Image: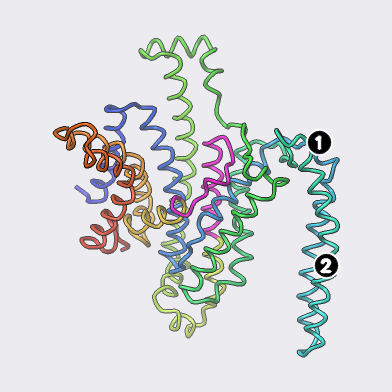
């Protein structure tokens, strides 16, 4: 049998066993996040596997996708808009105009002290005007019922539109970052993307007018029914009884299945598009640039432009995954965007699955996410058995049981080492 099919079958068996041994609710919850993780891994694989771009700012683009769900799907707050909405956007336009004027002045004037002074003067005057317009508007907006709102809200559109919008928002940020950072060497690019991602998270945490900051936005609209509504449906309750399930369990499983179908459609569409791109002349050109930039440049290829294309594409996919994840959570919580979850873990998925291979990234997404969730309870059960001979209250027993919380990181390290040792190119290597 095909080795790849066996690998996917083995991972599928892990999810099936989870359903039988724990619950199908648990298995479907892990599976849905596995689908989203696979989408994130595809985005990183496009950047690293296709073009060799070392982006460690994944969480910044994921966070922008989450922000897009608020900006698109939440209803607008009329009081906040009346208090300072238009002034906020006027201030943002003023800031963009200041930057644009400084760039034009820099390009038009000849080098020297006069040009430096002119650019500095534009920035100083623009900054003063910007703060003069922005600060009062921000304070007025955040003072509008801060316990429940205190922000502008969104456009009130269907939340499914937030998924492509999250990709577009992340793509716009990637364009701005790429225009300045893609000329850097790989290690400096990594530092730059990490720093910019931290800036994005800091802005989301502190600018309450935008998305309530650390107060979080809860109650995001859903693309699927609510469990309570299903439980009040006579036909649904009758069908659940026919299947031998109580309405609460059946409604939860049904909602998770609907989410899974939506996420699977996105993942399959992205796999089809990325495979088509990989096997096209464009994909062969990207791999040629990755393997030898000097030779590609000698053949007339614009390496920086192609790097920008691939950086924007991968970031857009990560942004879309961020919007999907926030939709699944039903709330935007900027404090949860941690590098451990959205950078290290996604990179482990790509490396373990096989960088440069789209199917390998998908496999890595499902496998690593299952391990990330399950190894701690499994490790706790094993440790309880191991420590049974030890007396209750024993210092060694307490130490061993307390150490279970670190088993996730230990497992990720061991898996990564084993794969790098016995399959250095990943479980499904690039052809």
Task: Using the image, determine if residue 319 lies above or below residue 9.
Answer: below
Choose between 13 and 118: the one closer to the eye: 118
Residue 52, image quadrant? bottom left
- Give residue 395's mark: none
Disc number lying in front (1 or 2):
2
Q: Position of residue 82 (x, y in %)?
A: 85, 40
At 46% from the left and 35% from the top, the residue drawn is: 261
Q: Are marks 1 and 2 in contact (CB under 8 Å)?
A: no
- Indicate yes or no whether the magenta region holds residue 316: yes
Residue 30, image quadrant? top left
Q: Position of residue 348 (x, y in %)?
A: 36, 56
Q: CA distance from mark 1 to mark 2?
A: 29 Å
Choose between 136 and 269: the one closer to the eye: 136
- Dot 1 surroundings within 10 Å: few (below 14), some, or many (20 or more)? few
Q: Secondary structure at mark 1?
A: helix
- Dot 2 surroundings within 10 Å: few (below 14), some, or many (20 or more)? many
- Tell me the magenta residue range: 313-341
Q: Which residue is mark 2?
A: 126
What colour scheme governs how the chains and residues are painted in the rendered image of this protein? rainbow
Q: Is residue 305 left or right of residue 345?
A: right
Choose between 192 and 215: the one closer to the eye: 215
Residue 424, image quadrant? bottom left
At 47% from the left and 52% from the top, the residue drawn is: 342
Q: Position of residue 331 (x, y in %)?
A: 58, 37
- Indicate yes or no whether the magenta region holds residue 404: no
Magenta stretch: dominant SS?
helix
Q: Is residue 172 left or right of residue 373?
A: right
Farthest residue in the left direction? 389
At 27% from the left and 28% from the top, the residue drawn is: 21
- Give residue 78's mark: 1
């Amino acid at each position: 049998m095909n080795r790849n099919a066996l690998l996917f079958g083995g991972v599928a068996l892990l999810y099936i066993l989870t359903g039988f041994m724990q619950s199908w609710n648990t298995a479907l919850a892990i599976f849905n996040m596995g689908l989203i993780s696979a989408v994130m891994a595809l985005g990183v694989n496009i950047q690293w596997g296709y073009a060799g771009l070392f982006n460690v700012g994944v969480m910044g683009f994921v966070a922008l996708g989450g922000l897009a769900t608020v900006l698109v799907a939440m209803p607008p707050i009329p009081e906040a808009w009346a208090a300072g909405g238009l002034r906020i956007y006027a201030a943002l336009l003023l800031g963009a105009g200041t930057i644009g004027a400084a760039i034009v002045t820099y390009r038009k004037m000849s080098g020297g002290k006069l040009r430096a002074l002119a650019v500095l003067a534009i920035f100083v005057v623009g900054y003063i005007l910007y703060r003069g317009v922005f600060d009062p508007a921000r304070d007025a907006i955040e003072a509008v019922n801060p316990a429940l709102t205190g922000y502008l809200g969104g456009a009130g559109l269907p939340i499914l539109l937030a998924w492509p919008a999250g990709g577009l928002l992340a793509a716009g940020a990637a364009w701005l970052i790429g225009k300045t950072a893609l000329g850097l060497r790989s290690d400096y690019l990594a530092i730059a993307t990490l720093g910019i991602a931290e800036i994005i998270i800091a802005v989301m945490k502190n600018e309450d007018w935008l998305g309530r900051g650390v107060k979080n936005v809860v109650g995001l609209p859903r693309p699927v029914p609510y469990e309570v509504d299903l439980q009040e449906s006579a036909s649904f309750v009758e069908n659940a009884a026919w299947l031998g399930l109580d309405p609460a369990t059946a409604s939860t499983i049904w909602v998770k299945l609907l989410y899974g179908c939506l996420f699977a459609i996105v993942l399959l569409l992205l796999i089809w598009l990325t495979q088509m791109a990989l096997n096209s002349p464009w994909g062969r050109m990207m791999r040629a640039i990755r393997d030898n930039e000097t030779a590609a440049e000698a053949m007339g290829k614009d390496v920086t432009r192609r790097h920008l294309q691939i950086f924007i594409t991968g970031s857009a996919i990560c942004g879309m995954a961020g919007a999907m994840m926030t939709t699944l959570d039903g709330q935007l919580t900027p404090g949860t965007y941690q590098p451990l979850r959205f950078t290290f873990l996604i990179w482990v998925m790509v490396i373990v699955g096989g960088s440069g291979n789209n199917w390998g990234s998908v496999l890595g997404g499902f496998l690593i996410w299952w391990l990330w969730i399950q190894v701690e309870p499994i490790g706790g059960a094993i440790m309880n058995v191991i420590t049974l001979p030890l007396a209750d209250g024993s210092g060694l027993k307490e130490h061993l049981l307390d150490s279970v919380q670190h088993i996730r990181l230990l497992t990720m390290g061991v898996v990564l080492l084993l794969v790098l040792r016995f399959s250095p190119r990943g479980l499904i290597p690039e052809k």
